[in-house]
Image (tube, rainbow, N blue to C red):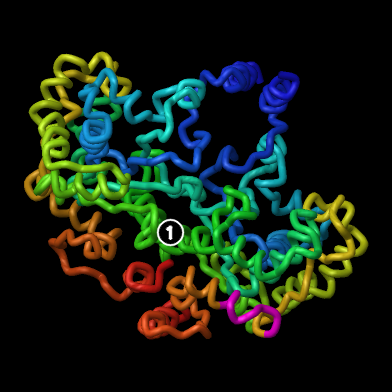
């Protein structure tokens, strides 16, 4: 009870991190993804596009694109509007303008494996197959499994106004092209130079340099192992050499239908005849408002 | 400030409504649906299945199958495991085992209209056509449920035909109650003889529930202090929308969620070239789903 009283007091004063209980405003914009899917890169790109006068770095990124897991309720309430909020949350009907970044779950699983090493949640020798089993079961993050997180958003929002789906792999291929989509989604007047500047300020080299000098200033890298980087490979297809085949089979068995829809080629033959696959068809090619 | 202190105290004492802050246990089972989709009927069926020695009533249902969105955190904490919990929440990844009931949104909308009048959310004079518009945009529904399409699609798509998820259609439960009750019993791992199943269906019949609403409506959190001239247990029927909803209202619902409806086996009456294509896809899916 004392614990709940202290928590209740912090809550009343607005000192807690609201996370899922964030007070949402109708003009809020969300940069959403499952963890380890290019969210931080997207935050840098979008912040540098929207606020060209303030180059994004690890010391200001939480203010430019606020994170409800890292800032207090009070700080979030005082942010200038419209806020561009970073989030990993599973479907929330209150979020009306959403940019959702999706990444090949085989690369996501590999990246999260290394991130969990960085945070000291698992040892360096932890079995990758075991990690992937837990990843598929949704036990490695509080935001649902990769498939649940994505499916919840796609099922409710894909092909409807206020939702922009971006693939991390497409951003790697041509960041300026994808950033142009973001610009039109946000209704920002675009120029080739403005976009090019945003891309240049957000390159992986630039971000690695910033991580080196500022890791201690940022909520997501403070008090984590410094020998494992946060900004990791920043490429697509690392799973081909980085994950055992059995782990790949597990991931594809669970989410082959979603991966196929997203254009991620499967290593093993897809199981295409189940409820899910047909639901993908019905939802994604059916009538929309 | 006084309000703030009260909130802190309520929270500290666990008197706040559990809702999304409910502490979920790994052995919890949830009965989930959008409001007005047969959740209370299913609650009674499940309660009578789990507790053959104590017939479910409006006076004991909150103990047998508590409502996470009506009860406090402390109340929910005191329910012994394994709990079976009622909810209207849109997809929540923390719910480990879920019985999800879906009902034709055209009937749901009609039922919700009466419910909203019963609860005093709208006046009797509020036009039904306008209400349907609100239903589709979610303007009058709680942000805890989302719209019908958001609620149904988020659950069905995230959990689909996976273990630990049982998808029921209200219409199938009405048409073949013993078959659907058998599926529920199997899902919960409870053996039940045909005689026992019949007793459960009798104890959960619409007539019996109407009678209980009359005598015990004041004892139940969902009906007390609400208008008693509009019943909570309404028609308990299928297809009322066909003669009570205007074609424009039907078209509004179907254009918002036609793809989800077809996939779940609800035939559209507002035909467009696009919706006919998805209808074909829907039929094959349903065949497999029922098999």
Q: Callout 1: helix, strand or loop? A: helix
Horizontal and vertical percent position of residue A15: 52, 18
- Residue A36 counted in the magenta span: no
Q: Residue A175 occupies which quadrant of the picture?
A: top left
Q: Nearer the viewer, residue B219 or B240?
A: B240
Horizontal and vertical percent position of residue B43: 69, 61
Few, some or many residues within 10 Å of mark 1 (<14, 14–19, 20+): many
Task: Check the picture and name the quadrant holding the N terminus of chain A.
Answer: top right
In the rendered image, is residue A112 in sight? no
Q: Nearer the viewer, residue A70 or A228?
A: A70
- Residue B248 counted in the magenta span: yes
Q: Main secondary structure of the magenta part?
A: helix
Q: Residue at x 42, y 64 (%)?
A: B160
> Position of B97 compared to A245: left or right?
right
Mark 1 sits on what residue?
A156
Label 1 marks a residue whose chain is: A
> Position of B55 compared to A271: left or right?
right
Q: Nearer the viewer, residue B199 or B143?
A: B143
Q: Which residues are magenta?
A: B243-250
Disc count in the image?
A: 1
Horizontal and vertical percent position of residue A215: 22, 18
Q: Residue at x 47, y 80 (%)?
A: B290
Horizontal and vertical percent position of residue B227: 86, 58
Q: Residue at x 36, y 35 (%)?
A: A84
Q: Residue at x 43, y 32 (%)?
A: A81
């Amino acid at each position: 009870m004392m614990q709940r009283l202290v928590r209740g007091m912090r809550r009343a004063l607005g000192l807690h991190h609201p996370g899922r209980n964030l007070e949402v405003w109708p003009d809020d914009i969300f940069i959403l993804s499952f963890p380890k899917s290019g969210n931080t890169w997207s935050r840098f790109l979008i912040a540098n596009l929207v606020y060209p006068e303030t180059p994004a770095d690890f010391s200001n990124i939480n203010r430019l694109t606020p994170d409800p897991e890292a800032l207090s309720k009070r700080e979030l309430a005082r942010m200038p509007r419209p806020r561009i909020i970073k989030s990993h949350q599973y479907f929330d009907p209150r979020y009306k303008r959403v940019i959702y970044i999706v990444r090949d779950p085989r690369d996501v699983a590999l990246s999260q494996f290394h991130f969990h090493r960085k945070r000291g949640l698992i040892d360096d020798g932890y079995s990758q197959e075991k990690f992937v089993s837990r990843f598929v079961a949704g036990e490695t993050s509080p935001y649902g499994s990769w498939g649940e997180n994505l499916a919840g958003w796609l099922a409710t929002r894909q092909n409807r106004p206020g939702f922009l789906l971006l693939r991390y792999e497409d951003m790697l291929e041509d960041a300026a092209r994808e950033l142009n989509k973001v610009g039109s989604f946000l209704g920002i007047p675009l120029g080739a130079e403005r976009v090019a500047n945003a891309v240049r300020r957000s390159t992986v080299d630039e971000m690695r340099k910033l991580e080196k000098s500022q890791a201690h200033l940022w909520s997501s890298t403070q008090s984590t192992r410094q020998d494992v980087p946060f900004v990791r490979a920043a490429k697509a297809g690392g799973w081909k050499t980085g994950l055992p085949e059995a782990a790949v089979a597990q991931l594809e068995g669970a989410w082959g239908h979603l991966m196929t829809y997203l254009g991620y080629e499967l290593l093993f033959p897809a199981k295409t005849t189940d409820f899910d696959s047909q639901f993908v068809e019905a939802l994604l090619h059916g009538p929309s408002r | 400030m006084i309000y703030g202190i009260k909130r802190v105290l309520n929270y500290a004492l666990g008197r706040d409504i559990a809702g999304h802050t409910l502490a979920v246990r790994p052995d919890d089972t949830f009965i989930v649906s959008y409001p007005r989709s047969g959740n209370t009927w299913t609650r009674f069926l499940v309660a009578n299945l789990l507790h053959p020695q104590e017939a479910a009533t409006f006076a004991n249902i909150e103990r047998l199958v508590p409502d996470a969105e009506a009860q406090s955190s402390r109340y929910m904490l005191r329910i012994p495991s394994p709990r079976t919990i009622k909810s209207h929440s849109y997809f929540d990844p923390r719910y480990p085992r879920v019985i999800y009931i879906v009902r034709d949104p055209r009937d749901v909308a009609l039922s919700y209209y009466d419910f909203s009048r019963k609860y005093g959310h709208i006046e009797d004079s509020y036009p039904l056509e306008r209400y349907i518009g609100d239903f589709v945009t979610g303007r009058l529904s709680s942000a805890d449920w989302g719209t019908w399409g958001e609620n149904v699609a988020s659950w069905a798509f995230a959990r689909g035909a996976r273990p630990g998820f049982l998808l029921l259609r209200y219409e199938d439960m009405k048409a073949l109650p013993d078959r659907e009750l058998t599926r529920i019993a199997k899902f919960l791992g409870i053996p039940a003889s045909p005689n026992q199943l019949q007793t459960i269906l009798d104890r959960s019949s619409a007539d019996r529930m109407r009678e209980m609403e009359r005598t015990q409506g004041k004892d139940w959190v969902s009906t007390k202090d609400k208008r008693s001239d509009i019943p909570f247990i309404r028609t308990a029927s299928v297809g009322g929308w066909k003669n009570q909803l205007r074609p424009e209202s039907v078209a509004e619902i179907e254009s918002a969620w036609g793809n989800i409806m077809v996939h779940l086996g609800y035939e559209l009456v507002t035909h467009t070239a696009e919706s006919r294509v998805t209808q074909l896809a829907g039929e094959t899916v349903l065949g497999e789903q029922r098999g």
